Image (spheres, helix red, strand yellow):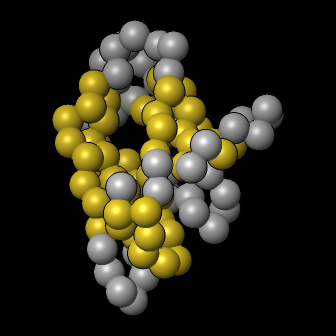
C-alpha cells in the first residue's frame, strides 16, 4: 500500500479472533501501530477481532510504500472493507 494509515471493517461471529499483523515483514512497531494493535507474549503485533466495527491497524508518521500482512489460523474472520488514508500532516 501507499498511504499513512490503514483501517478495516472486520468481524468474528464465532468469538474473538487473534490476527497477527506485519508491516514490511516485521511486527508493527509502537510508532506504526493503529489504536487497535496490541502485542502478544511472543512479541507479535496482533489485532483482536470480535464485534463488527472499524479497526485502526496502521498509523504511520510519513507517507510511503509498505506491505501489510494479516495472518490467522482461526475460522470465521470476516473482512468487509479496507481503507487507506493519505494525509500530508500525519495519519
- Quadrant showing the C terminus: bottom left
Q: Is residue 89 left or right of residue 62?
A: left
- Asked whether residue 62 is in view, the answer is yes
What residue is drawn where x is 25% and y is 54%? 83
* Residue sitting at the far left: 80
Closest to the observer: 30 or 65? Answer: 65
Q: Is residue 71 left or right of residue 82?
A: right
* Residue sitting at the far bottom: 89
Relative vertical location of residue 87 with respect to residue 67 in this rendering, above or below:
below
Relative vertical location of residue 83 with respect to residue 39 in this rendering, above or below:
below
Relative vertical location of residue 70 with respect to residue 13 in this rendering, above or below:
below
- Asked whether residue 38 is in view, the answer is no
What residue is drawn where x is 20% and y is 35%? 80
What residue is drawn where x is 77% and y is 40%? 43
Question: Across the whole image, how many numbered discs are drawn on residues?
Answer: 0
Return the x and y of residue 25 as percentages of the image width and height: 61, 43
Closest to the observer: 79 or 2? Answer: 2
Return the x and y of residue 38 as percentages of the image width and height: 62, 46
* Residue sitting at the far front: 65
Q: Residue 41 sits in which quadrant?
A: top right
Q: Residue 32 sits in which quadrant?
A: bottom right
Return the x and y of residue 65 as percentages of the image width and height: 43, 63
Relative vertical location of residue 28 with respect to residue 76 in this rendering, above or below:
below
- Quadrant showing the N terminus: bottom left
Amino acid at each position: 500500500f501507499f498511504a499513512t494509515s490503514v483501517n478495516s471493517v472486520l468481524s468474528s461471529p464465532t468469538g474473538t479472533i487473534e490476527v497477527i499483523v506485519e508491516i514490511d515483514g516485521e511486527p508493527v512497531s509502537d510508532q506504526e501501530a493503529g489504536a487497535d494493535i496490541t502485542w502478544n507474549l511472543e512479541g507479535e503485533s496482533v489485532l483482536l477481532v470480535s464485534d463488527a466495527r472499524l479497526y485502526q491497524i496502521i498509523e504511520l508518521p510519513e507517507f510511503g510504500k509498505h506491505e501489510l500482512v494479516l495472518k490467522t489460523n482461526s475460522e470465521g474472520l470476516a473482512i468487509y472493507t479496507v481503507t487507506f488514508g493519505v494525509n500530508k500532516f500525519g495519519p
